[in-house]
Each structure stands twice: as structure tokens, then as C-alpha cells.
Amino acid sequence: MSGICGFVGAADPALVDAMLGAIDYRGDRTDVATAPGVALGYRFWGGRPGKSPGIHRAAPHLVACAGTFAPPVPSPAAALVDRLRPGPDGLDALDGAFAGAWWDGARRRLTLVRDPFGVRSLYYAEHGGVFYFASELKQLLAIPDLPVRPDPVALHKYLTFSFVPGEDVPVLGVRRLLPGRLAEWDGRTLAVTPYFTLREAIDPALADRAAAVRTIRRAWRGAVARRLNGEAEVGLYLSGGIDSSGVAVWLRKAGVDVRALSLDFGAAGVEKPQAKTVAEHLGLPLTFVKAGGEDVAPVLMDLVWKLDLPFGDAVTGPHYLLGRAARESGLSAVFNGEGGDQFFGGWTSKPMIAAELYAGLYEDESREELYLRSYHRFYGREEQLYTPEFRAQVGGPGQRRAHLAPYLRSAAATTFLNRIRLADIALKGSQNILPRAERVSNAWALDARVPLFDRALAEASFRLPPQLKLHGACEKYVLKLIMQRHLPREVVWRRKFGMGVPITDWVLGPLAPVIEELLGPASLTQRGFFRPEYVERLRQGRNDPGETRRRRIGERLWALAMLEAWLRVFIDGRGRRPEGGLR
Amino acid sequence: MKCIHCRHDSKYRDRADGKCPRCHHAFAFEPQKGALLTDAAFQAAIDAVSAKGRVRWGVEHLYYEICRRRRRRGVPKLGAVAVFLVALLLGFQTGSKLLGVVIAAVATGVFIRVMSRRVADTVQVPLATFDAMWADWQRVNGAPTGLIARKAEAPAPRPAEPDLADYSFDRAVICDRARTADLLIANNFHFENNCAVLAVGGYPPGPFETIRTMLRRNPRLQVLALHDATAPGCRLARQLATSPEWFKDLDVVTDVGLRPGLAGPFMGLLLPNEGGAVLAGEGITPSEAQWLSRYALELAAIRPEQVLKRLFRAINRKADEDETDDTMMSGDGARNGGARVARDDAALAADAGDSDGGADAFG
């Protein structure tokens, strides 16, 4: 919930009202503060604990801060300036889910800051001599004379990752601040510096399982407790897997009332019995939320608008339905178990380990290329999908690999597993899982709490010997060792199943009319990016040759459909709320 | 004959120099001079084994694809002459020479038609003939896209990653021959399915022992034996299940390979067994021994795309059967002095289609 915006330069302060108006679903109150050549805006819900009650004014300073710190403080805006100093009480421990802007009138400097892992977003653009910033892209697009043209290079990356990585934003001229960064605008240039970088520091003492269990248990439990702002009741998205079930355990131990919500995919669901088992074991009220393709179709355009950036993972639709159910039951904050795979060695490590062992038998394929392939979208399929005109605009080779090299070849880790973990955290975690979770929650005025993305817990996870994350073939081993004292055996030691969105059934069934509207020959020809014959083959339910998994049909069609919907809302419609929906 | 380069259809007299008269692309084959196939037919065979360039394949797959297209027996010429003469003699008994000739012609025609439709049991294209065609094709057109070619030199070692050997795999496919392992690895089966792929004889040599050691770290490893219908192939699962070097301590090894009972759809693609009589026992039944004494059937007779899809289907059928991974609690799996061998004859028996995705247990 909540959002900020503003500018430095000679612009009309009324622009801030327009930028706040673009995110009217992020709060029922607004606050605007101005100084000569500067304006800051803040939209928020009144009466929510742990949130700034307005813009903090302490001449010559103006501070706007959306979100919360962990542990919570009464007003993040009032505390922010002190927390931006180096040291154990400042930047060294700064954590939470926040995005802040601090105007120092004496130095005439604007400082922007994002939380360590990127729950909250910040975009910026320089246009007409004015520096603009905002929590959401659509706020910048509300600036009337800002040109809105798609960035083919960013779209090309989206088509590989299913999200846009790095500082790129798929609108030319707009950039975003990376998580864990401070940025200072001095009127001419933006200087960006990291204040948090995750590094491996394996502690030999943690090779002892009991010591490892104690350390991670304490950090995990603390991470959950640090995200309680005093609410009497919170929600929890419970999948039945070890991560969300573990969060449920710590919430119960913190003494807070928990209302669990879980997805019901009908016959295609695989985790429903486990969620039920966990809820019964912990005595949580559990609501199953029906999620079918027919439920997603009517909300699709609102989902795309609220997501702000294109996100191509099909889980966003069901999460939107979960958020709606949580809001309807009166909740204002929901916890989830996202992050367990990233920090504690989920299944995503395994393909890269296998590839590394077999590398070099036939032809050279770099670690980066294999990692890109693991996203299973359109990497290596560009010639089949892209029109020659679009292909010519996406730039030269190596742009996507450049996002990975800092992690996959990182000197900050000495083990292969942790290099993959660093890449997963920085890309899938910070640029996909967290921002999409925050926006889908905000779509329903919910505060997203993601306790596994906790600074202290993350640092503890990188002190563990990696064999306690992936133990043989057993994933998230240390989390399972911790939870076997608290949860039924069949929940803790069950083999991993995917999220299980039956997306291929959806896009070929109840969502087929929507897919036709977005990806039919007329639409594709008008957009000019993709070859209709390739997309038509997918729409007929025919997989790429050599592709063994049927789910890839749905994943690829959905990613294309979400992109076309995003282009309609944010490029054709300049980010305005879409009127009506698709068929 | 059509040129594969420009699709121009030329007469023999126009391509006397062995080149397309329009684009001057050289032809690899000339049926007028006795070649078994046209260039276009050979290209069509390559397209079929490579799924139009999207699947990696081996030259052995192309051999069987050519055999698949040439699996009918030839018409015995002496037989046709004999039928004609006998029918002619019988026809003359009618008293009319004209009627006799007609009867002989009809009988010979029927004979030729019937005989030409017979499908041979074994391959009809000699390997030497194929090798010569393959050499001609590569001389003219180069190596086709997707052809699996091992590096001549051992792969350059990547930066040392000492922790790799500490992990394991969810499953392993053990093959009876290295070329089958090549097919799976080159098509990233290991990467897509967290699946070790090894050939029982020690392939790939570089990481072989490291990977085999890693497999022992997973007491609930899913093991599949993939093999030809040969005597050693049909004994592979049992060998894996009883050898202390392999999986004696696991619960079960599943045989998903080819066996004589699956040979029905492969008529014309069998090889004559040249290894002598096969005795029943050690995983081979008496009727299988009888068949294996006469024939062999290689996995390469199945198109690569189908091998990958059918194997994917098999591993996911197995994954459905057991969901709980609780051996990590107690440390060790069941120990009974040898793994049980399970048969999954359906694995390779039926084609896998576009919609055949299996249970797909990966996120």
C-alpha cells in the first residue's frame, strides 16, 4: 500500500496531484509538500500501523516514505534520514519494504532509497530539464508531455525472463532504481550507490546441523516477528509447502491471529490437501479460493494495470483472486512464503548443477546461456517468434547475459550453489517475485509481508554450508529440519511440486477468447512484433518440437498475452485505468 | 528431380553435370545412375529425424529413417518370371493365346503388387550403402543442423566448483550404449529433468564417476534403464539392480527400454542377431531369448523427438507414484540385498503427442 512521487526542477506542482491520482487504489489520503523547484507527493491509507502518517517536514528537509521498516517504526518518513547514515543503527541494518525520497533543501539534493530486496519500487525519468520519480510507472506516464514509446530491448529481455530485469523499464527514457541502492540527484546527475550487497560468508561452525538449525530458526522466527506491525489479525497465503507453512508456524508462535487462504485449482490442484493438513494442525481458519481460467478472464486488464510492469508468470492471476478474497474478509496485511527457494536451495538449483556437470561435451554453451534457457520462455526461439522488423530493434548479443555475469561468476561466493542463489535472488526474487507480490496485494489495499526476504535471515542463509540447503537431492534441507518439530511429516518431507497453475488448460480453454483477442492474427499484425504463424501453432495447442512439457504452451502464450495487454494499457493508453475488459 | 536449394524440378538431361540447371547447386545423388534416394527424399529424412532442426540427433537415427522409408522387400525377379510362365502355360489351356497372355499378365501384376507390399523384418538398406550416401551428402551439403558431434578433444575444464559433487539428482537414466546417452544429453534431457544420464560402460568419461557417486547420495533415486532389444540391453536393469557399483541398495530399478515384445511396430527396422544363441535367464524370458537369438532392435529406430517425449512421460509416471521424500529423516532407504526390477513396457510402446506432457512435477 501507499506510494510516493515528485520532481526536482521547473514543473507545475499540480503534476504531483496527477501522479498521485494515477495510483488512487494505493490509499484514501494524499499529502503534498513543495519547496522552490521541488514537490513531493505521498498517497496512503489512514490508520494503518507502521506507515508514515504523512510527508515528514523538518526544514530544510522534506521526506516521503511509502511502506514499512522491519522492525516497524511509527513513521518511516520521520526515521528515514537518521537511517540513511552508515553504521549498525543506520544503513547497515536498514530493512523492510519501503521506498523513500528525501529532499535536503540546504544542499539542494534529492536522495532516493529502496528496501534491500526490492519489495517497493522506484522509477525515475529526466525530461525537459526536470527529474521525476514515482513508485509506479503509470505515475510517470501521467506527465502529459512525457513521450511514451516502447523500448524493444527491454521487451526482448521480458520475452526471455518473463519479467523485465535490471534497471530497464519497457518505456524509453524511464529507468528504475535497483533494490538496496541509494541514489542522489544533484540537479545534473544521478549518483547511485549500493548500501546492501549479499555476500557468502560460510561459517564452519554451522556445519554442525544443530547449530545451523538454531541459527536459521532464530533468524526465520525473527524475520516474521519483525514484520508484525501490531495488527490483531493477519492473512497468510498458504500453499502447503514448507515455506508458507513455516511462516504460519512462526505467526502462531508470535500470538497473532492468522487467517489462511489457499488456491483451489479444482482437479488440477496438487497442494490442496497439504494446505488443509497444515491449517488443521495449527488450528488456522482456512479459506480455499477458487481459481479457474474463467475467474481470471474478467479481471485480466485490471490485473495488468495494477501490475504496472509486464509480468509473464501465470501465478499473478490466481494471486489477484487470493488478494480479492483476503480483502473481502477484512484483512489489511498478508504474509507469504516467497523466498524459500531463492535463499535455501529450492529446485531451481538443480538444472544448473546438472548442466554444469555435463558442460562442454558437444559445443560450448556458457553458464549464462544455460541460465537464460532455464526460464523456458523465448530464449533461443527468437528467430521463430520475432518479425524481422522487431528483431532488428532488439540490439546486439550479450545484453541478457550481462545481467547474470555479476552473480554467476561472482567473487562474492565460493560455491556454485550460492552463485546460482545470488542470481536467483537478484533476478527472480528482487525483480519478479517481490514487485509482483507487492502490486497484486496493493491491487486490493493489502500490505504484502514477505518475511523470507529479510536481511538478517538472508545473511544467515549465506553463512550456511550449501550442503544444508541442497542436501543430496533434498531441497531446503535446513528448513525441513527446523519444521519437522512443528509440522506433520507428510508436509515437511513431501517432494516438491510446482505451483500448479494449469495455464495450458486455461489458455486453450476458458481463456481462449481472451488469447484470441490479444494474440489473434489481426492483433499481432497490427503490433508487428511477432510472427502470427508461430503464435498460431501455440494457440492450436501444438508444442515446439522437442519440447516435452505441455505446460510450456500455456506459459509461452500467457507471457505473450500479458505483454500485448500491457502494451495496450501502458503504451497505447499511457497507463490510464483500462475501461471495460476483454471479451 | 527437385533441387533442395532452389526447389527447381529438372529433367535428367538438364543436370548431366550433376548440378541444378537453375542455381547450380550440386546434387548428392542421381537416381538415374542407381542412387537409392533423391536429394529431396534424403533431406526429408533429415527433417523428420531432426524435427526440422529443433531436435539434436545422431547419424544412426538417419540410417533408420532411411530404412523406414525403404522397408518393403524387393520383388523377386525370378519369382515374377516363374509366375508369368506358369500363368501363360495355364492360360494357353483355354485354347486362346490372347487370353493366355492376358491371364499371365494379370497374374504377374498381382504377384508383383502383393510382393512389393510385403514389409521385411530386417533392415533393407545395407549399412555400407547408407555410409556411402551419408559421405556423399556431407561432401555436397556439409553436416546438417542438429547433428550430434562430440568434441574431438576432451572439454576444457570449467572453473573448479568443488561443491558440485556434494549434491545429487532426482533421477537417473542409465543407457546400454553411449550414443543413447549422447542423444539425451545433447537434447538437454539432464537439464530439463534433473536427471543424470550415464552409459553403463562409463560414458561420459569425464564426469562419469563424479555423477555415479552423486547418485548414491539420494536414497530415493528414481532409476530407469534405457536400452536396445539385445541380450545385454534386456539384462541391463537386472545388472543395475544387483551390482554394488550401481543400485543394489535402492528399492527399484525400472526397465523402460526396448524388449522383444515391443518389436511389432518396427518391422523392417530389425537387425539380424549376429551374437549367437541367447539363453533365457538373468532378466530374459524363454520367448524373449528365442527372439533375441534371431534379431536385435536398436533404440535409434525410434525418432529422437519420440524418445525424449516417451521417456519424459515415463519418468513422470514414476514420480506420481511416490510423493514423500522422508528418507532424509532416518538417513537410509530400504535395504534388501538388491533392488527390485520393474518393467514399464508402455514407456516406449506408444507415440507421445504434443499434448502428452506427463504429470510435470517441476515448478
Image (cartoon, rainbow, N blue to C red):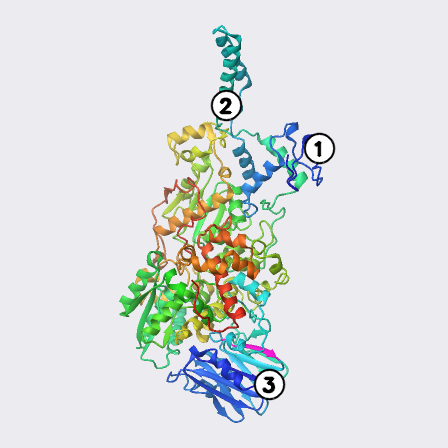
Q: Secondary structure at mark 2?
A: helix
- Could you tell me the amino acid type at mark 1? Asp
B214 or B75, which is in the foreground?
B75
Decide: is B272 above or below A510.
above
The residue tagged with tag 3: helix, strand or loop?
Answer: loop
Query: Quick check: is A438 in the magenta stretch?
Result: no
Would residue B85 be seen by someone viewing this image from the given angle? no
Against B290, residue A99 (above or below) is: below
Mark 2, residue position? B113
* Crowd around label 2: few <14 · some 14–19 · many ≥20 (10 Å): few
Which residue in the protein does label 1 denote?
Answer: B14
Residue closer to the observer: A38 or A219: A38
Q: Which residue in the structure is indicated by mark 3?
A: A9
Q: Residue B161, position in %: x, y?
A: 54, 60
- Figure check: A292 above or below A23: above
Q: Which residues are magenta?
A: A121-127
**How many C-alpha atoms fall within 10 Å of the one at disc 3: few (<14), some, or many (≥20)?**
some
Disc 3 chain ID = A
Q: Quadrant of the C terminus of chain B?
A: bottom left
Looking at the image, can residue A560 be seen?
yes
Whole-number angstrom distance, CA of label 2 to CA of label 3: 90 Å
Mark 1 lies on a secondary structure that is helix
